[in-house]
Structures are given as structure tokens and as C-alpha cells.
Image: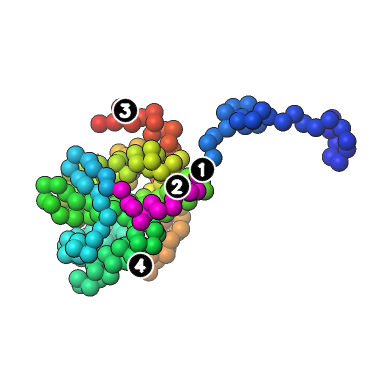
């Protein structure tokens, strides 16, 4: 037995490229993948949607959905009260792209030719290859599978191009539509984060959902 501090034989080192149990070591996250991402946010296309950066021309479209109290009911932000609120929001996102800070995609519905919502990452920890998603969309477009379509595209992009290993999303328990989007995008319920956030005058619980790259790789072919 090797005693602490003795000159006895060392424990055998595991061979390079393998972990302690001899299994192949997992690929280490590459923090450099984050550099320039939001400055050059890629355009993603799905059957019905184009996801692209917000521009100042989108202010009216953003106001149309973000001023609806029903849309903001379960979000961390308040419904926009004026076009100025929407302009401030869009300007903040445009500035974030310029400064390579986290900012969402605008969701353009091809058939309408306008922005109907936003989706994207609200957090990204490149060191841990982990990111969190958030989204919101105008009420007249709910229930057509559009957000699921957008989230699937973003999840696929995150795993194939951003080096992510884990993608999370959170919603308050009453927001069943959002929870369904997460489930339909392949995320698994992991638990309730009790009173994890102070929002709109109260402490709120959040349901945590997540999907790992290996789960996505196994199930994506079979998805409807
Ligand atoms: C949540 C939201 C993004 C969903 O978008 P969507 O395009 O309508 O979502 P989808 O059509 O892809 O899927 C919605 C699913 O929820 C279900 N659903 C909708 N309302 C529901 C309710 N009250 N209870 C249970 N399920 C509900 C739908 O039936 C559908 O599931 P199904 O396909 O199994 O029938 C949209 O409602 C929204 O923007 N809400 C306001 C902003 C918001 O809450 N954002 C999320 C914050 S965490």
C-alpha cells in the first residue's frame, strides 16, 4: 500500500487520452468557440422560418408582439408599453451583436415576411460547453409548432457548430406551452428550482429542462 508522503511506488497513471476508468476521455470544451459568435450571428433556416439578427427595422414588429400582456405573462420582462420600449430593446440587441455579447435571433415567418418573435441563447458558458435557451413569440402564431421548429434548429446548431454538450431551458411551472416546446425539442425534465428567481414582485420556481449532445445524437433521426 502506498502511504501518504512515502517513497513507495506511485499509482499507475492512466494512458494518455483515457480517463481514470480507462474509458476514452471526453473532448474538453473549447472556450475560443465563443469569440466573434454574436458579432457574426449566423442565419439559420427552417421550413417556415428564417432566424437572423434583429435590426432597427424590426422595431414595429417587435412592438406588435411584445406589447401583448399575454405574451409577457410568464416572461422575466414586462410587456412593452410603447414603441420606445421596443426600440430600446432592439437597440440593446444590436449593440450586443456589435460588442459580441449574448443576443437572440429574430424569427422571421417566411409566409408573413415579418418578425414574429425571438429565440436564442440567454446564457453560454463555453468553458463548460453549456448554454441556456429563451424564446417568445406573438400570440396569433401560437400552437402551430413554430417555436418547436425554431428551438430544434437552434439546438442542432448548438451541438453541431458551437461545441455545446448541454443545452438547458427553464420556465415557470404554469407555462405548460413552454414546457411542451422543451419536451418536443428533446429536452428532459430535470427538476424544480425552488424560488430561484425574483421576478415581477415575487420569488418564482422554475422547471429545469436540458438535453445532452449524446441524447440529441441518438434521437434526432427519429424525430417527427
Ligand atoms: C411558449 C411559446 C413559445 C410556445 O410557442 P408555440 O409555437 O405555440 O409552441 P408549439 O406550437 O411548438 O408547441 C406548443 C405546445 O404546447 C401545448 N400547449 C399550449 N398551451 C398549453 C397549455 N395551456 N397547457 C398545456 N399544453 C399547452 C400545445 O398543445 C403544443 O403541444 P402539442 O404539440 O403537443 O399539442 C409561446 O406560447 C410564447 O411565445 N409564449 C409567450 C412567451 C413565453 O412564455 N416564452 C417562454 C418563457 S419560458
At label 2, counting other C-alpha atoms closer than 10 Å, the crowd grade (few under 14, some 14-19, many 20 or more) is some
Label 3 C-beta lies within 8 Å of the nearest ligand 1 atom: no
Residue 27 at x, y percent in the picture: 53, 36
Which image quadrant for residue 15? top right
In the rendered image, which residue does mark 2 sit on?
A: 33
**Considering the image in quadrants, where does the N terminus appear?**
top right
Q: CA distance from mark 3 to mark 4?
A: 40 Å
143 lies left or right of 188: left
Q: Main secondary structure of the magenta part?
A: loop
Q: Nearer the viewer, mark 2 or mark 3?
A: 2
Q: Kindly identify the residue that appears in the image at 41 percent across and 33 percent down.
A: 215
User: In the rendered image, which quarter is residue 65 located in?
Assistant: bottom left
Dot 4: element: loop
- Could you tell whether 43 is left or right of 34 in the image? left
Numbered disc 3: secondary structure: helix
Q: Is residue 76 left or right of residue 190?
A: left
Q: Earlier in the sequence, mark 2 or mark 3?
A: 2
Q: Nearer the viewer, mark 2 or mark 1?
A: 2
In the displayed orientation, state which residue is furthest to the right: 7
Residue 183's x, y, as percent? 33, 40
- Please report the residue visible at 33 percent of the width from the left and 65 percent of the height from the top: 95
| Left or right position of 151 against 167 | left
Q: CA distance from mark 1 to mark 3?
A: 25 Å
**Disc marking residue 200:** 4
The type of colouring in the image is rainbow
- What is the span of residues highlighted in magenta in the rendered image? 29-42
User: In this view of the protein, which residue sits in the foreground, 8 or 36?
Assistant: 36
Dots 2, 1 in contact, CB < 8 A: yes
Q: In the rendered structure, does residue 39 fall within the stretch colored magenta?
A: yes
Disc 2 to disc 3, how far (Cα)? 26 Å
- In the structure shown, which secondary structural element does the residue marked by tag 1 occupy? loop
Tell me, for residue 221, which label it has, or none.
3
Amino acid at each position: 500500500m502506498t502511504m501518504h508522503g512515502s517513497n513507495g511506488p506511485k499509482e499507475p497513471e492512466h494512458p494518455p487520452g483515457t480517463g481514470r476508468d480507462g474509458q476514452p476521455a471526453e473532448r474538453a470544451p473549447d472556450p475560443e468557440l465563443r469569440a466573434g459568435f454574436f458579432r457574426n450571428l449566423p442565419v439559420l433556416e427552417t421550413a417556415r422560418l428564417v432566424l437572423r439578427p434583429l435590426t432597427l427595422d424590426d422595431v414595429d414588429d417587435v412592438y406588435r408582439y411584445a406589447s401583448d400582456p399575454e405574451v409577457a405573462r410568464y416572461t422575466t420582462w414586462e410587456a412593452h408599453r410603447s414603441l420606445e420600449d421596443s426600440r430600446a430593446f432592439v437597440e440593446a440587441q444590436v449593440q450586443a451583436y456589435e460588442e459580441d455579447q449574448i443576443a437572440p435571433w429574430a424569427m422571421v415567418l417566411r409566409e408573413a415576411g415579418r418578425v414574429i418573435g425571438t429565440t436564442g441563447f440567454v446564457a453560454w458558458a463555453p468553458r463548460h460547453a453549456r448554454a441556456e435557451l429563451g424564446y417568445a413569440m406573438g400570440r396569433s402564431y401560437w400552437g402551430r409548432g413554430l417555436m418547436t421548429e425554431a428551438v430544434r434548429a437552434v439546438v442542432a446548431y448548438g451541438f453541431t457548430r458551437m461545441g455545446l454538450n448541454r443545452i438547458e431551458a427553464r420556465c415557470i411551472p404554469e407555462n405548460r406551452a413552454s414546457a411542451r416546446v422543451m419536451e418536443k425539442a428533446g429536452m428532459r425534465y430535470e427538476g424544480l428550482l425552488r424560488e430561484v428567481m425574483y421576478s415581477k414582485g415575487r420569488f418564482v420556481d422554475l422547471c429545469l429542462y436540458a438535453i445532452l449532445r449524446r441524447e440529441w445524437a441518438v434521437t434526432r433521426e427519429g424525430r417527427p
